[in-house]
Image (cartoon, grey):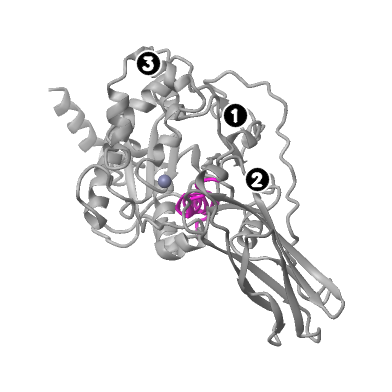
Amino acid sequence: MRQFVVLVCTLLLAPLHGGAQDAKTLPSSDERYKADILLVVAHPDDEGAATPYLARAIYDEHKRVAVVFTTRGGSGGNDYSREHGAALADIREQEARQACAALGIVNVWFLDGKDTASQNVLNSLANWGHGTNLEALVRIVRLTRPEVILSWLPGVFIGENHGDHQASGVLATEAFDLADDPVAFPAQVAGASKRLEPYLENLTPWQPKKIYFFSDASDEKQFAGTGPAYSVREISRSQRKPYWRIALDAAKPHLTQFPEDIHKLSKLSDEQLEKLMSDPDHAWWSEPMTLIFGKATVPVQPWEAIFPDVEPRQKEPPPTVEQYSGPAVVYNVGQGPPLTLALGDPWNFYERFRQAHKLADLPHAHDPEIAVKAGSSVGIPLIITRKPGAVREITVKVTVLGGWKVISGAGKFVLPDEERIYLRVELQSPEIPEKELKGQPADSIVVSGISGDSGFGEAGLRVLLRLSALPQ
Ligand SMILES: [Zn+2]
């Protein structure tokens, strides 16, 4: 009856309003996919680098988390069953979805990057298809509209130093800077198209507020003070168990990656697990976990809590990040000395990357460094810049400890008549017995450029020899 009255009134009033109808509510963004935190990682199981913090954010701070895996992890070994290659990637995707679901995370996307076993971020970006995957990630940022992005630290450090990890951090940084720019991938934000329009996406430009990183470097202590520190041993108020325990239980679907550990840990009592995870030599996560501050578009202090509205403010002193003191890279060939020599990519790329993305304070190795397998070959990439008219005949000299062999790249060279020349010194590292490798310091390799009687530049790399490491 009431409906009928409303209808009659509407019909009676209609002519008076010149034919206007009730205002129609236009569709809004899909709230089911709105995230407070977007985690951008490379491989199924990488989410584990952040799960103790995510457990806190999800269960005790009621934050919504979405995850992007930039690869499906098909190139590692399978230690659980016989599937490999593309079939293994299919399994790993399911394992990752189950691991995320264990924390209540269901908004999970996989990009098209190929799992690339190398320490060089540029190998990963090349093998992934950098542009296509960046476009896809910008789309997910615009869809999920995160307040905060978390990702792997883009930089070269002694450690696992996985190129894929670094590449996911590069993409996350680029997406952070691009998603709010309406001329970046404009078809994504072209709106109000007709129904059944299959090309234009009607998303909204979006600026996340902050970006933080975590690292696979061996020495995690070097990042202390570079961002907020979160206890992994603290007991979750709502779950009544430590955050490490929630994270550990969520890692159990990753059977193709570390089945022995999962089986072993599953047999331990709560007390035994507690003891194991309190031991710094065996714990999966360091206590506390530092999330390295990248940058923010709102006024914050780097060491402040990620969500100051729900977390107590951390009153730590400002971080002191040591300034980069590696070889200077000369970009402006028109000025400065006639010839320069510096370390090439990926170090040259990262120096430019930090400048381009306003990440000058992002931690980076004080002196360029890397870890490689003892007995493997090591390449020192170099960039020589040359002013027009400068001499073209140079000598490249390599200074290295005994046991190392220079294979190529040293000696006399005539440079092409160009302003930027790439050169590579190849060395063979010494074979060292396993027991002697433990505790050995990194070896320093110094490459000098000489023109006539004087040097025109030096590039150094600290190389730590290990029992195993990803190819350089
Ligand atoms: Zn990984």
Query: Does the Cβ of the disc 3 residue fall within 8 Å of ligand 1?
Result: no
Q: Which residue is mark 3?
A: 272
Q: Who is closer to the viewer here, 206 or 39?
A: 39
The CA span between labels 3 and 1 is 29 Å
Residue 93 on image: x %, y %: 27, 46
Range shown magenta = 159-183
* Amino acid marked by disc 2: Pro
Query: Going 57% across and 58% down the picture, which residue do you hit?
Result: 430
The CA span between labels 3 and 2 is 34 Å
Q: Which residue is mark 1?
A: 228
Residue 158 on image: x %, y %: 58, 47
Q: Is 413 above or below relative to 240?
A: below
Which of label 3 and label 1 is nearer to you?
Answer: 3
Q: Who is closer to the viewer here, 378 or 229?
A: 378
Query: Going 42% across and 57% down the picture, which residue do you hit?
Result: 117
Main secondary structure along the magenta-highlighted residues: helix
Which of label 3 and label 2 is nearer to you?
Answer: 2
Q: Quadrant of residue 97?
A: top left
Q: Residue furthest right?
A: 453
